[in-house]
Structure formats: structure tokens, C-alpha cells
Image: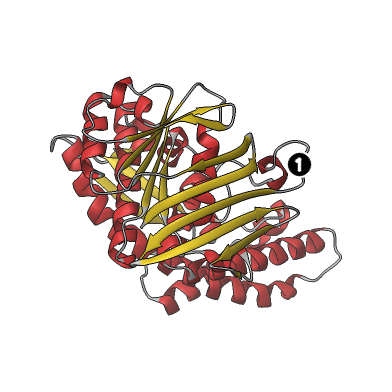
């Protein structure tokens, strides 16, 4: 997958900008606050349909403007494509002249993987950050997953609303039975998707981490269910989650929230048998996050047959020289967009194209 043209108008501080990138490494440089990350963010939206920085569409439109528009020309499977993202009151995607029914229906059309300073949060932050990582990564290779996730989210919201009604005596407890059955069935679907992804990602990430550490350390990934189920059978997963919901019902009513299910699960990351979040050094945490993101990129390639576009947003400054070299070595055959304040630390690259961004415009390349 190769981006051949990029254009943005009124996206954050990008007033009017047009780029024609190289098929290899593209370096987007300039001072802080000039719009480098905005370019990366807008490209990523063609993959994730949402920003990786905010959920508020209004923040993506230049102040005083009513609409932002981003256009992307790219090749995939030997075919040329033109995609447009229009941001007004809602997001609208257009692919080759046809308006998509919903942003989610655009999933899988253009694939990219973003590395940013916040990538470390996968290891360092709360379980919600790791669930978010899994949800996005799985949706890239299994678009149907997002449909199950949306359905689960709606069922969960309805169950929590009923819990509130029961807690104030406005509804009877037995009304939960129907929602528990639906949540258990849908939750089992999500759990299977996640477990299969983690199993496959682990095989790739473990080898990458071993290479990063020079064979001195071992990475381990494990999907942990809040229902304490260890089954890989969908029927048993459904039964176990339903039983857990019944068992925790009294506490759920008291706290007015559902305490078990995929929305409470976690991806447990270990380095040499210890929790990476609690005990790993910052260097080890960076290596683990890097291995997970590279595994994500390779899984997209294996499933789609296309190399995803790699977006490196100010990530080189977060890595030491050895990790920089390893990352660039892994990505030498991919199209890469790399942001930085100056180009001094990428002189080791044999070939790259530069774009100088200043005040939301490209002032030279």
C-alpha cells in the first residue's frame, strides 16, 4: 500500500497543503506546533476512522471554518484509489467517488500503523489502553470485529442503565436475565477474536523483542479475562461469562456498573516473567511497545497481502540508537512517514524525501 498524493484543507492548522510522497521514507520536519503531527493524524484517520488524539470532531476543524477536508491517493493490490474525508457535523468518507454508508464501512480500505510517544501507554497505562490497542488492531484485519464491538457496547450501556433503575427500585432484578444472555453471547465473540489475535501477535512480537534485547530477555503476552475463564470454546466462554454476570449481579447493582466482560479484560505483558507495567525499565517498556506495534504491522501484511503505511510521529527521539536502527531495518521495504524537528538523527538513511512544514504549509521538499 503506497500513498501517492496527500492534500488537506483546514484540518487543525493545515490551511492548504499538498504532498507527493516517495514510496520509501518521507521525513516531515519543522519546529513544534507547525502541523507535522496533524499530517500523521489525518492520514491515520483513513485507517482508524477516528483520530488517535481526540474524539471531538470539532477539534479537527480549523477555528472559524465550517469544514475540513483531507484527500488521499493510494495504490492497493495494484489499483489506484482516491479517498476523501470530509469533516463537518459528522465524518464522511468517499472512496473512488462513492460515499460510504458509515465511517466504519471504510475500515480495511486503507491500512496504516502509527507509532507515537503515546504508543508507550500500551505498556504503561491502565487496561483500557491495552483494550483500545487490541480493538483497533483487530478491526484492521477483521473488519467484522468492529460490528461485534459496537453491538457489545450498546448491550453493555443498556445493562448499566437497567442496573441504575434497579438500584433505585424502578425495575426488577430479573429483567437483567435477558441482557446477561445477550452480553454473554456477544462478549464471547469479542473474547475469541482477541484471544486469537494475541496468540498470533505473540509469536511475532516475542521474536522481535528477542532480537531487540539481543536474546537476553523474553517477552510474554497473555489475554486475561475478567470472568476468570480459560476456555477457548465459544459455547463455554458464553456460559462462563453468563455465570460470572449472575455471580456479580448484587455488586453490579450496588456499584451501578457491569464488573465482568471484555470491557474489563486485559492484555498482560511480561518481561522475563514479571509485569512489564510494574517492573520493566523504560527501555524494556519501549521495546515491548515497539514489538507489539511491529507485530501489528506484520499481521496486517500477512492478512491483506499489502504492506501497511507506517506513521512514525516523533518516535525516533523516544528511542536510543540501537532501537532506532532496528526499527528502520525492519521497515526498510515499507512506505514510511516520519516526523521530527530536524533531520540530523536520520542521516543514516540512504534515501529519503523531506517535507519542511511551517505554519501549516509545506515550504519546501
Is residue 245 among the parts visible in the rendering? no
Across the whole image, how many numbered discs are drawn on residues? 1
Is residue 117 among the parts visible in the rendering? yes
**Residue 124 x, y percent position in the rendering:** 43, 35
Residue drawn at (74%, 36%), measured in percent from left and top? 63
Between 264 and 167, which is closer to the camera in this rendering? Answer: 264
Question: Element at badge 1?
Answer: loop
In this rendering, position of residue 63 left or right of residue 146: right
Between 327 and 206, which is closer to the camera in this rendering? Answer: 327
In this rendering, position of residue 251 left or right of residue 284: right
For label 1, the crowd category at 10 Å Cα-Cα, with few meaning under 14, some 14 to 19 and many 20 or more, is few
Name of the residue lying farthest toward the front: 364
- The N terminus appears in which quarter of the rendering? bottom left
- The C terminus appears in which quarter of the rendering? top left
- Using the image, determine if residue 24 lies above or below residue 213: below
**Residue 42 x, y percent position in the rendering:** 55, 46
- Using the image, determine if residue 182 lies above or below residue 349: below
**Residue 271 x, y percent position in the rendering:** 27, 39
Residue carrying label 1: 65
- Using the image, determine if residue 309 lies above or below residue 117: below
**Residue 257 x, y percent position in the rendering:** 67, 55
Amino acid at each position: 500500500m503506497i500513498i501517492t498524493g496527500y492534500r488537506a484543507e483546514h484540518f487543525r492548522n493545515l490551511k492548504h497543503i499538498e504532498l507527493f510522497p516517495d514510496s520509501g521514507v518521507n521525513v516531515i520536519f519543522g519546529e513544534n506546533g507547525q502541523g507535522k503531527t496533524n499530517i500523521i493524524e489525518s492520514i491515520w484517520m483513513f485507517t482508524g476512522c477516528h483520530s488517535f488524539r481526540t474524539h471531538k470532531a470539532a477539534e479537527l476543524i480549523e477555528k472559524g471554518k465550517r469544514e475540513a477536508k483531507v484527500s488521499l491517493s493510494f495504490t492497493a493490490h495494484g489499483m489506484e484509489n482516491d479517498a476523501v474525508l470530509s469533516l463537518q457535523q459528522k465524518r464522511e468518507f468517499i472512496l473512488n467517488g462513492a460515499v460510504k454508508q458509515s465511517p466504519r464501512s471504510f475500515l480495511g480500505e486503507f491500512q496504516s500503523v502509527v507509532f507515537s510517544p503515546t504508543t508507550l501507554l500500551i505498556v504503561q497505562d491502565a487496561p483500557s489502553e491495552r483494550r483500545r490497542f487490541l480493538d483497533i488492531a483487530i478491526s484492521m484485519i477483521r473488519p467484522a470485529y468492529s460490528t461485534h464491538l459496537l453491538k457489545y457496547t450498546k448491550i453493555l450501556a443498556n445493562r448499566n442503565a437497567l442496573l441504575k433503575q434497579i438500584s433505585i427500585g424502578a425495575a426488577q432484578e430479573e429483567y437483567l436475565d435477558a441482557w446477561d444472555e445477550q452480553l454473554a453471547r456477544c462478549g464471547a465473540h469479542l473474547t475469541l477474536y482477541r484471544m486469537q489475535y494475541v496468540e498470533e501477535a505473540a509469536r511475532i512480537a516475542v521474536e522481535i523483542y528477542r532480537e531487540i534485547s539481543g536474546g537476553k530477555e523474553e517477552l510474554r503476552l497473555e489475554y486475561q479475562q475478567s470472568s476468570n475463564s480459560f476456555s477457548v470454546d465459544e459455547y463455554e466462554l458464553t456460559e462462563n461469562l453468563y455465570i460470572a454476570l449472575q455471580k456479580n449481579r448484587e455488586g453490579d447493582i450496588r456499584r451501578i456498573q457491569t464488573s465482568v466482560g471484555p470491557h474489563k479484560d486485559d492484555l498482560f505483558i511480561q518481561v522475563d516473567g514479571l509485569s512489564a507495567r510494574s517492573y520493566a525499565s523504560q527501555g524494556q517498556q519501549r521495546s515491548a511497545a515497539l514489538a507489539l506495534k511491529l507485530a501489528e504491522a506484520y499481521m496486517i501484511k500477512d492478512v491483506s497481502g499489502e504492506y501497511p503505511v507506517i506513521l512514525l510521529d516523533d518516535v525516533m527521539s523516544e528511542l536510543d540508537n540501537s532501537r532506532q536502527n532496528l526499527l528502520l531495518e525492519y521497515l526498510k521495504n515499507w512506505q514510511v512517514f516520519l516526523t521530527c524537528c530536524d533531520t540530523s538523527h536520520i542521516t543514516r538513511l540512504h534515501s529519503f524525501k523531506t517535507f519542511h512544514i511551517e505554519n501549516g504549509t509545506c515550504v519546501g521538499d
